[in-house]
Amino acid sequence: MADFQTVARTGDIPAGEGRAWPVNGRMVAVFFIDGEYTAINDTCPHMGASLATGHVEDGGVICPWHAWRFCVRDGTWLDNPTAKLRNDAYEVRVVGDEIQVLVPDPPSHTPPTDSPEADPAS
């Protein structure tokens, strides 16, 4: 079961910027905007650039490779907000001076019951 993990301390992320850390098997971009910490998947779904290194403005981060824009709060693709394409967003909390992020466990692989992989005798 996933739990909050400390990624940084307050003051580690300059205002208006992001930084990336591995959390529970994923790279997570944490942003500090208007006194609030937010977190989304660090990997741009287009070509895999680190979103933490992108330019942040108006509540969005601009991918440094091809300028795709994502909301730093909920991962919405700002270039087409009605699209199904989006980035995962994660819960953030501050405990004392620790910035903590909750990233769900990755889905486990469970083979279908009728697959040969599910039968240890095969």
Image: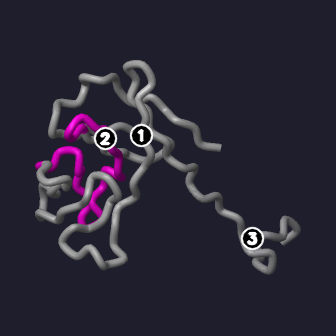
**Drawn side of residue 2 relative to residue 53, left or right:** right
Q: Secondary structure at mark 1?
A: strand
Query: Vertically, is 97 above or below 62?
Result: above
Q: Is residue 12 above or below residue 59?
A: above
Place residue 38 in its image quadrant: top left
Mark 2–mark 1 CB contact (< 8 Å)? yes
Identify the residue position indicated by label 3 in the image: 117
Q: Position of residue 75 (x, y in %)?
A: 32, 59
Residue tagged 1:
92
Front position in the image: 107 or 40: 40
Labels 2 and 1: the sequence-earlier one: 2
Q: Height in image: 34 above or below 117? A: above
Asked whether, in this view, residue 51 is left or right of residue 102, the answer is left
Provide the secondary structure element on which disc 2 rests: strand
The spot of residue 114 in percent (x, y) is 80, 80
Which residue is rendered at x = 56% and y = 54% of the image? Answer: 106
- Residue 30 in the image: x percent, y percent? 31, 41
| Quarter of the image where the C terminus is located | bottom right
> Could you say which is closer to the camera, residue 100 or residue 36?
36
Determine contact: label 1, label 3, CB under 8 Å: no
Q: Nearer the viewer, mark 2 or mark 1?
A: 1
